[in-house]
Structure formats: C-alpha cells, structure tokens
Image (spheres, rainbow, N blue to C red):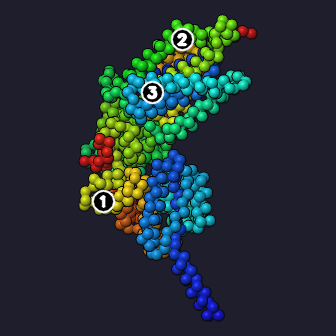
Amino acid sequence: MQFLYSGLTGGSIYALVALGYNIIYNTTGLINFAQGEFVMLGGMLIYTLFAVFGMPFIIAFPLAVVTALIVGLLFERVFINLVRVKSDINLITVTIAASILLRDFAMHIWGRDTVTVGEFMPVKSIELPGGVISNQSIMVIAVGACIAFILHLFLKRSKYGRAMRACFDDMTAAGICGINAVMVRVMSFGVAAAVGAAAGVLISPITFVTYDDGLMIGLKGFAAAILGGLGSFWGAVAGGILLGLLESFAATIMPSGYKDAIAFVVILLILFVKPAGLFGKRMAKRV
Amino acid sequence: MVRILAVMVIILSCLTAFAGEVKLGALFSETGPASYLGHPEKLTAEMLVAEINAAGGINGDKVVLVSYDTQGDEQRTINYFKRLATKDKVFAVIGPTTTGSSLAVKDLAEKFNTPLISCAASATIVTPVNKYVFKTPQSDIHAAETIFKYMKSKGMKKAAIITAQNGFGVTGRDALIEGAKVQGIEIVSDEKFGDKDKDMTSQLSKIKSASPDAVICWGVGPAPAIVAKNAKDLGINNLFMSHGVASMKFVELAGTSADGLKLPAGRLIVADRLADSDPFKPVLMQYKKDYEGKFNMPVSAFGGHAYDAFSLFKLAYEKSGADKDKFLAALAGTKNFKGTAGEFNMTETDHNGLTSDAFIMVEIRDGKFEIAQ
C-alpha cells in the first residue's frame, strides 16, 4: 500500500508537468523540452523568496508562479519568436537549446549545490491503512488537483482558453475569426511555465532543488504526456499519476536501481503498441 | 688535479647548502563538483607550508609548494602530475582529492619516481600496495566496522542497507557486506538508490517490512538527505549514515529529519567536545584554531586529510632528507603519528595505517554533531 501513497505524490507532479507539455502542444503543435526547467525554476524561485527573503508562503507561492509566467512569456518572445524558419523541428531544437541555457543560468545564479527550501508547514506523518503519508504529500496531491481543475476551467470556459483550442484545431481559421494567433502562442508558453513552476514549488520541500533537476523531471513528464496521449487534458493527468504509481510499485518488486528506467520503458512500449497514448484520439489525416 | 676536484666538491656542497629547499607538488580539486573537498585541502596545505617556512623549514630546507587545480578531472590530473614530475621536478606530491583521479596517477607515481600521498578515501588506492602511493583518509571498511560495533553494543543484530549507485555507494556496499560477515550482523534487506533520485519511500517501506534493528544508508550529496526525510515520514528509527555526510551541508539539507541520526566520523567534527584526556584533542584543536582563525570558515574532515598528508611528508622528510628511497622507507615506517584522521601506523603492506579506531560514532542533535552515547 505504501507505494500507492508515494506514487500518488510523484504522480501529481508528473501530471502537472505533462499538462504543461499539453498546453503548448495544443496551441502550437510543439514539444517544449524546456518544460522541466520551469519546474526547477519554480523550486529556485520559491527558495529565493521563501527561504532567502523570508516571505510568507502565501505570498511567495503566487509570486514565484507569476515570475515563472513572465519568464515563460519572455522565453517565447526570445527563443521561439526570433526563429526565422518556424518549422517544428527547428523550434523543438530551439527549446532543447533554451533548456540548456536556462540550466546554465540557474547554475550561475544559484550555484551548483543543492538548496533546501525549508518546510511550508510543520511536517506530520499520517497513518493510513498499509502505510503512512506525510501532510506535505497530501498538500502536493491536493494543490496539484486544484491547479489541474482551474486549468481545465480556463481552457474550457474562458475566452482565452477557447482561443487556444481554436488555434490548435486550425491556425488559419482561428486567425480569420479574429483570434490573434501570436498572442495565443505567447500566452500558452506563459501558462505552461506557470504550471511547471507551481509543480516545482510544491515538490521543493520534499526533494530539495538542484540546478540540473529539470532534465529528469522534464523527461518523465514527457513520458507521462505520451502515456496519457499527447494533447489530451485528462490523459496527461491520468498518465502522470499512472507513471508515478508504476515507478514506485516497480521499486518495490524490482531491484530499486531500475526505478528511473520505468519512465523510458513506458515511452517505448506506448510508442510500439498504442502510439496515440492510452487516452489520446487518433488524429485523422486527410490524404 | 686533486686541488681542482676539491674546489669543485666544495663549490658543489656550497651550492646544495644554499639551495636549501624542497619542492612539494599539490594536486587538489579546487573547483568542480569536488570543490568542497579540494578547496579546504588547498587552503590547509598553503597554511602549513607558510607555518613550516616561518619556523625555518624542514631540517633547514624551505618548502616550496607547487599547486595545480585538477577540477576533479582525471585527464587533467594525469597531465598536471606529469608536469609536476618532469618540469617542476617536485620531490613528492600530496593529493589528488578524489578516488578516480588518485587511481589515474597511481602507476605514474612509480614510473616518474615521485611519491604520492593521496587525500582520497577508497581502499583501492593502497590495495594492491604500491611502493610510491600512500593515502590519509580512513577506509570504508573501518566506517562499516565502527557502525556494526556500535550496533552490537546496543544489542542490535539485524541491519538493512540502502546504498547509492555511484563509486562511493558501491564500494561502501561491499564494505558493509564484508564487515557484517566479520561482525556477525545479519543483513536482512539490500536496497539501492540513484544519485539523483527524489523519492526513496518505496525502497524504505520495503526495508521497513523486513523489520531490521537498524537501517544503514551509504551515499553522498542530497540523496541521503532525502533518505533521512523519507525514513522520518515512515517512522523508521535507528538510521545510520556513512562518513560521507559528515558535513554541516548535509545537516542543513536534511533539517529536522537529521535529528537523532548517527554516523561514523573522524574526531575532527567534534573536536571541542572530546574529553581533555583524549590523545587526539591537542592536534585537532590546534588545527581547528589555526584554520578557522585564518580562513574564517568551519574546519572540515577533508582539510584534515591534507593536514595529515603534509604532516606525513614532513615527518618522513625530517628523517630521510633528499634521498627518495630513504624517504619512502621512512614514510612506510611511520609509527604512532597522531593526525586529524587518527593514529597512523604504516607498514610495508599497509600504506594507510589507520584502523577503525580512527572513527567514532557521532549523533546529529539539534543541527549539531555530538558524540553518540
């Protein structure tokens, strides 16, 4: 049973990262490989605001997320917008380059050492049938679920959310209807960065933050997005949680050294067996 | 003819008398990932050289330190070692900082006829023994022994181990399994974790279900701090760690979850809490006072390794002078030298000379290292 509790915690984070991939994929058709760096950035920002400047968590959390959102907007303006030939392969390569840049900046600003954020609240372990869960983990799961729900409302109900979805369906048609497609692209990067940073903030007291954390969590979030079906909102959530559970379950039955390999075995299996992902729709292609 | 020869001999002997200096090479990882080890080592070596020269040198010979930054990189270490041996023509080398770079130059020491006193921990540096290679830090097996002896004194018989998947963790795991056999401790669970893992709850809950008397974690960096945190959440008591986390950095990372955790460590980190009768106290306090006074930062075991390396060099050179063979014999014959790591008793076959007495069990209490009861 214990694997269930720790799997849910890790899974919530993967789900948020996977959602970040989906937001950008759904509006631009791109995979933003710098998504993991936003998670690291969230952790580093909360470290700076909460642990170094000593702001109350209730202020530091939104501030960290908003700062990340601004970085996300700038990220699009600098890295994506300036690329002259906007083919998918060019842009995806640019996101990889940008992720390395972000990591190096972080290394210079915050150093090579692992930093510790401290605790947002007094830690308690709660006894549950078959295991224990800390209140930190519960917070990660609960806040993660809230963020997913708010994001869902935003995409389904708000004007901007609809514009985002319209752009994915057909960029040209959306433009004709008066949607500013560039604006939507910029915004999708901002929102994705904010969601990633929120994940980074939530997980930081449990895992600490190191400048090069983004790579692994980014790849695992990507695995979760593939597992759930790239582009599917609830697919990302389900994929993330499933991946978290798989990982922690695998660590209990297999030699624990193989834990990290699980995510990548999952990517391969899905691509071999069901390329659209568990919950993805197969895209119709006109010939 | 005889007169000319006599004049030449006199001139030559005058020259050597005036030359009166000995060159000592130093290879430390001042920057790079191992900088928290290499930086204090470099500072310590510089401090000691300045002290000894102010006091008139060794047997009247001034010590000239030639130091290079290896950045923890093996190829760089090899290049710098060759440079020290051929271009700078040093008498001996202290360092390198890490096990990997020490092993990289192990064979070169003999090839270039340059003695090496390493500051890296792995026992593989001195086994199989090489006439030219020595090391000052304690070995893993001593740390494991210290933990098991402590466990036995508390009536604990079953241990679970959780080790990192890196050089330090793998050699540590071997030492634990070996040591457990000797000490009659049963290992009931053997788990591993990756250096960059963020959650070890699964491994630890597996360990918990094997109900060991104690859990021993072997790793360096942030991962052991996460193990401490997860273990606390799961309600695992009696967590032991390796000497790899004997630094304030670890205590900061792990925060309150480090409370009550025990580990084997050199006496240096608890120097001011040792009994006055402790034979090591004077040397430790002296080093601590000098270092902290000079550099205004807390002393660490790693700087201590350089202290021991330089002191061993000094003691042997005092006996041998500039003759390399005599120097090596003197170094291998070091007896009863009380350094920061422990008491060194070298032999032809043991080029470390420490025993498990070099370690004591310490406990982390309220964010400080204390001697474990």
In the rendered image, residues at marks 3 and 2 fall on the same chain: yes
Identity of the residue drawn at 49% across and 10% down? A153
Where residue A85 appears, as percent x and y from the top left, is 73, 24
Counting residues from the N terminus, which is met first, the one under dot 3 or under dot 2?
Answer: 2
Residue visible at 56% across and 87% down in the picture: B10
Circle 2 — which element? helix
Which residue is depicted at the point 41% across and 33% down?
A53
- Who is closer to the viewer here, A14 or A27? A27
At label 1, the amino acid type is Lys
Q: Quadrant of residue B291?
A: bottom left
Q: CA distance from mark 1 to mark 3?
A: 45 Å
Question: In the rendered image, which quarter contains the N terminus of chain B?
Answer: bottom right
Q: CA distance from mark 3 to mark 2?
A: 23 Å
Along the viewing direction, whichever of A266 and B79 lies nearer the viewer: B79
Give, as a three-letter code, the residue at label 2.
Leu
B132 left or right of B139 in image: right
Q: Select label 1 or label 3 by which is in front.
A: 3
Reading the image, the residue beneath label 2 is A155
Q: Alpha-carbon neighbours of circle 3 within 10 Å: few (<14), some, or many (≥20)? A: many
The chain carrying label 3 is: A
- Residue drawn at (54%, 19%) of the image: A191
- In percent of width and height, residue B149 lies at 30, 50
Locate residue B215, reporting x and y percent: 35, 39
Query: Where does the image place residue A42, in percent across and percent down from the top left?
Result: 48, 28
Q: Quadrant of residue B245?
A: top left
Residue A201: numbered disc: 3
**Label 3 SS:** helix
Q: Chain of mark 1?
A: B
Give the labeled residue for mark 1.
B281
Q: Amino acid at mark 3?
A: Val
Q: CA distance from mark 1 to mark 2?
A: 68 Å
Between label 1 and label 2, give the one nearer the viewer.
2
